[in-house]
Image (tube, rainbow, N blue to C red):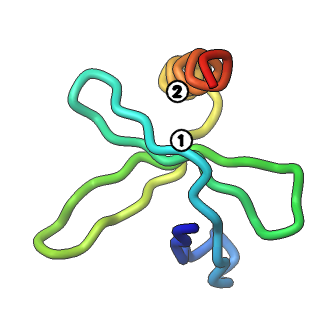
Amino acid sequence: MKYITVTMDNGKQEKLEVLEKIDIADKHYVIVAPEDSDLAYAYRVTVKGKFEEYQSVSAGKEFDKVLEKYNELMAKS
């Protein structure tokens, strides 16, 4: 299992498990979830030098596209 650590809006760092990696139109995303939780989040991945930055994808067209692609992948597995 792969994990990422993100800084939440409140400044707290949270360790999240990567459930799936998704590519849409040259953009990279991850679907992640906190340990022991039924919640999942989408983050856009941007590479800055040697590091990856994660930006939360909130409700809207971009989120809808990521969710649709994730559901397609889950239907195939």
Q: Quadrant for the C terminus, please.
A: top right
**Residue lying at 71% horizontally and 57% vertically, measured from the top left:** 33
- Looking at the picture, which amino acid does disc 1 mark? Val
**Residue lying at 56% horizontally and 76% vertically, measured from the top left:** 7
Q: Which mark is residue 66?
A: 2
Circle 2 Cα neighbour tier, 10 Å, few/some/many (<14 / 14–19 / ≥20):
many
Q: Is 10 or 18 nearer to us in this picture?
A: 18
**Residue lying at 63% horizontally and 83% vertically, measured from the top left:** 13
Q: Is 46 or 2 nearer to us in this picture?
A: 2
Q: Is 4 displayed left or right of 46 in the figure?
A: right
Residue 35 picture location, percent across and down:
79, 70
Q: Quadrant of residue 18?
A: bottom right
Q: CA distance from mark 2 to mark 1?
A: 9 Å
Q: Residue furthest front?
A: 77
Q: Quadrant for the N terminus, please.
A: bottom right
Q: Is 52 displayed left or right of 8 in the figure?
A: left
**Residue at numbered disc 1:** 57
Q: Which mark is residue 69?
A: none
Determine whether the residue tagged by mark 2 lies in a helix, strand or loop.
Answer: helix
